[in-house]
Image (cartoon, grey):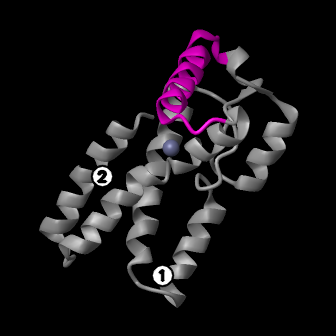
Amino acid sequence: MLPKTHFFSGIIIGFVFLLFGNFSVVEISIFLAATVLIDFDHYLYFVIRKKSFNLKKAYIYFKEKTRNLRLLSKKERQSFTTGVYVFHDIEALGIVFLFSKIISPYFLFVFLGMLLHLILDWIEKIFILKTSPSKLSLIYDIILYSKKKEI
Ligand SMILES: [Zn+2]
């Protein structure tokens, strides 16, 4: 899913939090930032795989991956993986939630932002792209990555 889709979804949910919840602008801003910045792991993946720090090339690289995936049939898509992303999993969510209990309650808003992002990614994967499940567990994604071809 494109960063702008995550950003606008975060704005809508953040606005609802602001209207109906007892949250500060700082808390909502952290939530909004987390909905987008979780995708930094895609850039890390690009840097490691392509040995390049070029952000524009990274953006194009992931747009092409999604485009190539869409060109395949639903059945063909099952044998491919798009990569392993360290912040897109329940392990990262668990760590951030733990941080909200032991470091600062602000991490709860990072957790909620990441959770919204992941829910949107899961919806895209399951209902739109109809690919094999991923971005649920880092361990599971590493296993998938070792067994499937990278698109
Ligand atoms: Zn994502």
The C terminus sits in image quarter: top right
Q: CA distance from mark 1 to mark 2?
A: 20 Å
Residue 28 among magenta residues: no
> Which amino acid type is shown beneath numbered disc 1?
Ser
Stretch of the chain drawn in magenta = 52-74
Residue at x 36% of width, y 44% of height: 6
Numbered disc 1: secondary structure: helix
Check the image and report above or below for 37 versus 84: below
Q: Nearer the viewer, residue 72 or 26?
A: 26
Mark found first going from the N terminus, 1 or 2: 2
Q: Would residue 134 be visible to someone looking at this image?
A: no
Q: In which quarter of the view is residue 143 placed?
A: top right
> Which amino acid type is shown beneath numbered disc 2?
Gly
Check the image and report above or below for 71 versus 26: above
The residue carrying mark 2 is 10
Q: Nearer the viewer, residue 123 or 72?
A: 72
Q: Residue furthest bottom?
A: 102
